[in-house]
Image: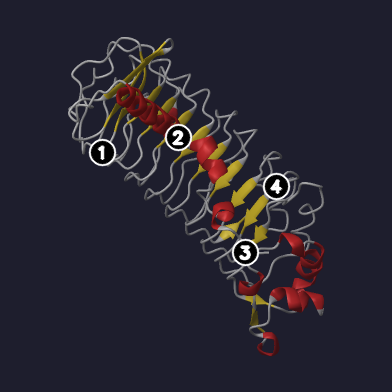
Amino acid sequence: MEKREATMSSRNPEQKQSLVGWDSHLSRIFLLLLSVVSAQGITPNPEACLVFSSVNGSSISCQPPAQIPHSLPADTIFLAMEFFNLTQLPADFLQGVPNLQELHLSSNRLEDLSPKFLLPVPQLKVLDLTRNSLTGLSPGFFRVSAALCTLVLKGNQLKFLEASWLHGLKALRHLDLSENQLHSLPPGLLENFTDLLTLDLSNNQLQTLPPDLLRGPLNLERLHLEGNRLQVLGEGLLAPQPKLRYLFLNDNRLASVAASAFRGLQKLDMLDLSNNLLTTVPAGLWTSLGKAARNLKDGFDISNNPWICDQNLADLYRWLVANEDKMFFRNHTRCAGPEALKGQTLLAAAESH
């Protein structure tokens, strides 16, 4: 079974829909604006932002060479100011747009934001700060942001996090902290995020995770931990997540996985353990996986690990034979030892065991 990039990528279509769906929303607005001005025979002013008015409010999209607006319509509900290389924004920049629901400031160079920046917009639901230069946030930055559902801090310069930065967030469903420089996470970081559906911590420098990391979220569906430096997946970390569907652990340094690590993951649709340092796994690890009708329906990947194909993999062999139709990259899942089996596919070793 070949693994399609769109299926196993940490940026597959479903994630884009759930985590960064505002991009398509912005694109629709942009195309709609172009079609409107084209139909009316109007040549868009390259120095003006695109503005679309509806019964719900105004949507504004600004990219260079447009000029940054000095004021915004009072009924603004959607604002995108991207690719301007802004390093600062005035603390009162959002004053006068109390109904703002989406704010996109990606691909600038923002270094910090005032603690008062979000105070005028308590109805904000989406905040996208992708690809800026933020090294931190002020404690209480989100103190009036109880409605915020999506927070994207991808591609900044965060080396650490403090739980106090996120205080005030009560409705968060999608949190993207990927592509930063995080070495560790504080305890209790997510303890109040009971509605969180997607957590993306991929492509950081995490070596360990706090044992209580996921004890707050009760409905997590997607967990991205790929591209870090994790060495051990301990017992209990995933135990509070009976609704987890997508688990990405690929491209780490995992050499050890606890026997009970996946216990309780009855709804898992996809598991990626590829490109790690696994030589063996404990008996019982796979007991709860691959049994239910929809379990691992989107497949699993354990390729590019240095598997030692001996009797210690007997439990994995049985599981592979029973679930081979869900296995990706079979030809890249090979034995690294013992010498007699070196280079043989793991599935062939399992079938001859």
Q: Position of residue 182 (x, y in %)?
A: 40, 49
Q: Secondary structure at mark 4?
A: loop
**Quarter of the image holding residue 86?**
top left
- Between residues 323 and 338, which one lies in front from this camera angle? 323
Q: Which residue is mark 2?
A: 24
- Between residues 53 and 261, which one lies in front from this camera angle? 53
Residue type at numbered disc 2: Ser
Q: Is residue 218 visible?
A: yes
1 vs 4, front mark = 1
Q: Which residue is mark 4?
A: 268
1 vs 2, front mark = 2
Give the alpha-carbon distance from disc 1 to disc 2, as whole Å: 17 Å
**Residue 290 relative to residue 243: left or right:** right
Q: Secondary structure at mark 2?
A: helix
How many residues crowd around disc 1 within 10 Å: few (fewer than 14), some, or many (20 or more)? Answer: some
Task: Report the residue at 82% width, 67% height from top.
Answer: 318
Q: Which residue is mark 1?
A: 83
Q: Is residue 188 visible?
A: no
Mark carried by residue 256: 3
